[in-house]
Image (cartoon, rainbow, N blue to C red):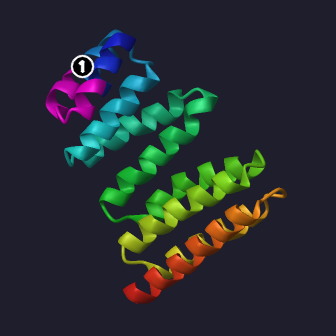
Amino acid sequence: AMELAKQGQALAREGKFEEALAAYRKAIALSPELYEAHLGAGATLDLEGNYDEARRHLARAIELAPAAQKERALRTMAVSYAFTGSGKDAEKFEKQAFDARVAAGDFAGAGEVADELARIYLEAGDPADAYTWYQRGHEAAYRKTDLSEADRDLWDFRWEHAQARIAARR
């Protein structure tokens, strides 16, 4: 089953979505608890625009994900909601990833997750929530105690750039 899931990943990377889905479905038939097959099927179905079925697989992937892969599954589900312009639904999953990074002391990583959610909100036409999450990302990154001057400059640039994009959208 894992070999089929790997084949599905390779086929999806080549843009052969129908073949990838067939491989993922075979993997799931052989091993219904295989996280990688559900995650791959969900991501591929999203690319085909089959969001309801995609989210069923992604929800299953979140349930089955080993701790080290949970964030990936959560963020993939958030992107699924980004495809349909639903920032609030995406936030339910991105916030879990953000909170986990903060709890682990990975403040720069939390900032990146927050910025990802902010971009989803901006693309969904919600500049107010985009602003909130860009700001939260900037503040999270600044909580890193050993933030270098170069990293500080980068995070400041990201924040300023985000504010400019929000202003342009408004």
Asked whether residue 149 is in view, the answer is yes
- Viewed as shown, does residue 22 lie left or right of 114? left
Please provide percent x and percent y for residue 147. Answer: 77, 59
The residue shown at (27%, 48%) is 51
Furthest-right residue in view? 145
Magenta-drawn segment: 10-23
Look at the image and say whether residue 120 sits in the magenta stretch: no
Q: Main secondary structure of the magenta part?
A: helix
The residue shown at (36%, 71%) is 124
Look at the image and say whether residue 17 sits in the magenta stretch: yes
- The residue wearing badge 1 is 23
Please provide percent x and percent y for residue 127. Answer: 46, 81
Please provide percent x and percent y for residue 140. Answer: 71, 63
Please provide percent x and percent y for residue 15. Answer: 19, 36
Q: Is residue 143 above or below residue 94?
A: below
Q: Nearer the viewer, residue 71 or 55?
A: 71
Q: Residues within 10 Å of mark 1 (few under 14, many from 20)?
A: many
